Amino acid sequence: MRIAVIGAAGRMGKVLIEAVQLHPQLSLGAALVSQNSSLCEVDAGELAGVGKIAVYCSNSLAAVVDDFDVLIDFTTPELTMANLELCVANNKAIVIGTTGLNEQQKAQLLGASKEIPVIFASNMSVGMNLCFKVLDTIARTLGDDYDVEIIETHHRHKVDAPSGTAISLGEVVANALDRNLKEHAVYGREGIIGPRPKKQIGFETIRAGDVVGDHTVLFANEGERIELTHKASSRMTFAKGATRAAAWLKDKQPGLYDMQDVLGLK
């Protein structure tokens, strides 16, 4: 299967190109850089540090639409939506790791999935998706007697907060405990806030240095604490998950899938 990587000059884009080259069922078909980038026509393999591969960077997805079967997109919500429209128009599958999508954009994903295969996940890490599965069991078992806090740390360049993964962790807990996350979530605390409401789900966000991504879900009651922690030390963790997802899409029918589907955890 031929893969297109958008944002090829970025930190994640370079790692994605490397991951595609390492995957036995995939090959790089296209690499996209920004409209005004000086890297247009540069060999994508050299850009990613994996050697020449004779795939040259382009600044137009439409211009290379015949060169790929699946697009991997870890960019911004606005750009992802534009790329999604192009994939629908040209019957191309897409793997989306972009975070920070609003409800309207998520509705667009659902609409597009009626036409093409779409994989959308807030976190492509295999380990984190196992955590999602385990977290559901923990929350259901502990019930309402335990306070729940979600702590996440990312590098200083991350623009959305809390992270998409942290929100997904909160959604898993809320669903397991039959709570509405919008009603029970609190994002940071300050001042005289009073006692903690029983069903509150707290989020704490840290932005510092070059942290790739740390997430902890804390369950606590009087006399006991349980912590479920996942730490990502390399973007390759997410890139390998994304390429695994892209390979899984082969011969799949249109639909909206996630990493739980890819890993057979549903």
Image (spheres, helix red, strand yellow):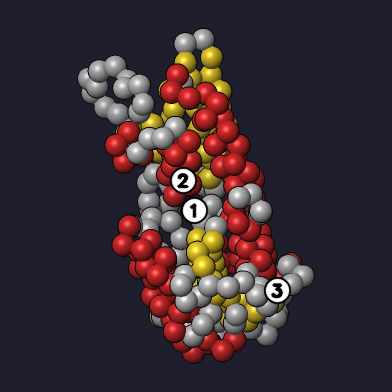
90 vs 156: above or below: below
207 vs 105: above or below: above
Q: In the shown orientation, is residue 208 left or right of residue 93?
A: left
Q: Disc 1 to disc 3, how far (Cα)?
A: 22 Å
The amino acid pointed to by label 1 is: Ser
The amino acid pointed to by label 3 is: Leu
- The numbered mark at residue 168 is 2
Whether label 1 touches label 2, CB < 8 Å: yes
Q: Earlier in the sequence, mark 1 or mark 3?
A: 3
The amino acid pointed to by label 2 is: Ser
Q: Please, which residue is most extreme toward the right here? A: 24
Q: Dot 3 corresponds to which residue? A: 26
Residue 234 seen in the current view:
no
Q: Disc 3 to disc 2, how far (Cα)?
A: 29 Å
Count of picture labels:
3
Q: Secondary structure at mark 3?
A: loop
Q: Position of residue 6 (x, y in %)?
A: 51, 73
Q: Dot 1 corresponds to which residue? A: 122
Q: Secondary structure at mark 1?
A: loop
Q: Residue at x 46, y 72 (%)?
A: 114
Q: Position of residue 88 (x, y in %)?
A: 45, 79
Q: Residue at x 53, y 45 (%)?
A: 213
